[in-house]
Amino acid sequence: MPDEVKKKSIWAAVSHSAFLEALSIFNKETMPYQYAMVCNSLGNALTKYPTAIHSDNFEKALFYYNEALEIRNATHFPFERSLTLLNYLEAAWHADNSGNEMNPQRFDDMWAKAEEVILINADPQLVTDAKDHQYKLTKLKDLMYT
C-alpha cells in the first residue's frame, strides 16, 4: 500500500492486529485449514512490513510459515504446501543470519524445503522456483568455501 513511511508503520500495526484476531478465531484445533491460511498470509504480510527496530519480521514470518506447514501436508494440500515452502524460502534469504555468515542449519533447512517442493511436483513453475533456490544456495556455498 503506497503511503508515507510513518503511515506504513501504522498500517502494518493495524494489519498485524487483524491477523492476530483472525488467528484467535481460526485456531489450529477447530479450524486447521483456515488457521494455516491465515498463518501463511501473516507470514507474507510480515515480509512486506517496514523494517522493525526491535525484531526481525522475516524471522517472525518463518515462524508463521512453519505453523502453516504443520497443517498443509503434501498428501492433502500439495499445492498449498509447495507455496508455503517457497514463501518460507524467500523469507529465509532475508532473515537475520548475522550471528554466522554461513548458517549451516538454515542452509540445510532451505535445501530440504526446496527439495520437498521438487518432490511434491504440484506445479511445474513451483518446481522451477525451487530449483532456482537450490541454484542460489549452491552458489552461496561455493562462495563461502572458495
Image: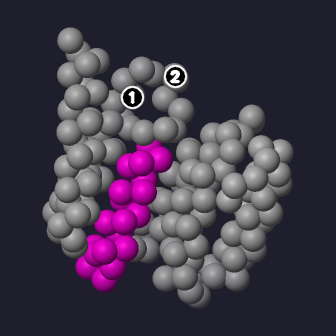
Asked which colour scheme the image uses, the reply is one colour
Q: Residue at x 80, y 63 (%)?
A: 14
Magenta-span inclusion, residue 61: no
Contact between marks 2 and 1 (CB within 8 A): the answer is: yes
Residue designated by label 1: 103
* Residue at 37% in and 73% down: 80
Instruction: Check residue 36 in the rendering and tell me which mark sits there, or answer none.
Output: none
Q: Position of residue 112 (x, y in %)?
A: 26, 49
The residue sitting at the bottom extreme is 30
Crowding at mark 2 (Cα within 10 Å: few <14, some 14-19, many 20+): few
Q: Looking at the picture, which amino acid does disc 2 mark? A: Gly
Which mark is drawn over residue 99? Answer: 2
- Quarter occupied by residue 31: bottom right
Q: How many marks?
A: 2
- What's the distance in space between the residues labelled 2 and 1, CA to CA? 8 Å
Residue 75 place in picture, x, y as percent:
26, 79
* Secondary element type, mark 1: loop
In this orientation, which residue lies closer to the viewer: 81 or 128? 128
Whether residue 116 is visible, yes or no, is no
Q: Name the spot of residue 111 as percent of width and height, x first.
A: 26, 44
Please report the bounds of the magenta region as a residue range. Answer: 74-92
Of helix, strand and loop, which mostly describes the magenta segment? helix
- Note whether 126 is above or below 47 in the view shown: below
Residue 138 position by quadrant: top left
* 89 in magenta: yes
Q: Nearer the viewer, residue 77 or 136?
A: 136
Q: What is the x, y in percent for residue 119?
A: 16, 63
